[in-house]
Amino acid sequence: MIWVFVINNIMATDNFIQSVKDAAKDKPQSIEWYRNKIREFGKPGGLDLIRDGKRVNTASLTNLNMFFYDPKYKKTLPYYDTFPLVLPLRRYNDGFLGLNFHYLPIPLRIKLLNKIYDLPESNQYDENARMRMSYARAQTMPMAKAVMKRYLYSHLKSQIRVVTPEEWVIATLLPVQRFKKASASRVYNETKKMI
């Protein structure tokens, strides 16, 4: 089990993730503590999460990213997530390729996050923390390969909200996935078959 710590003591705001961080009081907390605190505070709205964080127009390759999305091929996709939580692997002129954590049930999201934390190219223990995974390495990990998706900037419906290092675990635990054309349980079952 990973332990989480708050890297920076940031002034409290009214946003959801900051409220969970404030409740931790800069002390290491277990995953179960964070899950309970999130349940206590309730499910945040996607728009609130976007509004209450650092927003950019292009994906951050060393952090998780959340945004509203309308897929180009939604008519032919069996299902899709309109509010992805993505770790980009590659940037393209028109978008990026990344791992959408929402295609995994929460325990597997944490498992994938742990695997990425343990990679030598990731550096997660100081204020310059970054999360990195190469496309080649993702191809060798069935869990990562199963949630790899391509995103086009022209189909983003919001700015990208950068999820900073002290927010990674909280964002991963949030039940804010928005699947269309299938239930979350069906999506999770399909993903598990690919792992």
Image (cartoon, rainbow, N blue to C red):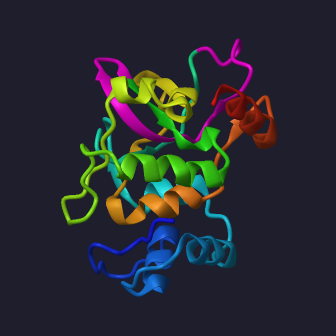
Apparent side of residue 173 relative to residue 13 in the rendered image (left or right): right
Vertical side of 121 occupied by 142: above or below: above
* Res 194 → quadrant: top right
* Res 191 → quadrant: top right
* Res 28 → quadrant: bottom left
The image position of residue 33, as x and y in percent, is: 58, 78
Vertical side of 135 occupied by 105: above or below: below
Apparent side of residue 152 relative to residue 184 in the rendered image (left or right): left
Residue drawn at point x = 48 percent, y = 71 percent:
15
Vertical side of 31 occupied by 120: above or below: above
Please give the range of residues in magenta.
Answer: 73-95
Asked whether 86 falls inside the magenta stretch, the response is: yes
The image position of residue 85, as x and y in percent, is: 51, 44
Q: Please tell me which residue lies in front, 101 or 67.
A: 101
The image position of residue 86, as x and y in percent, is: 46, 40
Apparent side of residue 142 relative to residue 58 in the rendered image (left or right): right
Q: Quadrant of the C terminus?
A: top right
Q: Please tell me which residue lies in front, 45 or 20.
A: 20
The image position of residue 104, as x and y in percent, is: 63, 42
Asked whether 146 falls inside the magenta stretch, the response is: no
The answer to whether residue 45 is visible is yes
Q: Please tell me which residue lies in front, 48 or 135.
A: 135
- Count of labels in the image: 0
The answer to whether residue 161 is visible is no
Residue drawn at point x = 74 percent, y = 29 percent:
190
Residue drawn at point x = 37 percent, y = 52 percent:
117
Apparent side of residue 20 relative to residue 123 in the rendered image (left or right): right
Residue drawn at point x = 49 percent, y = 85 percent:
23
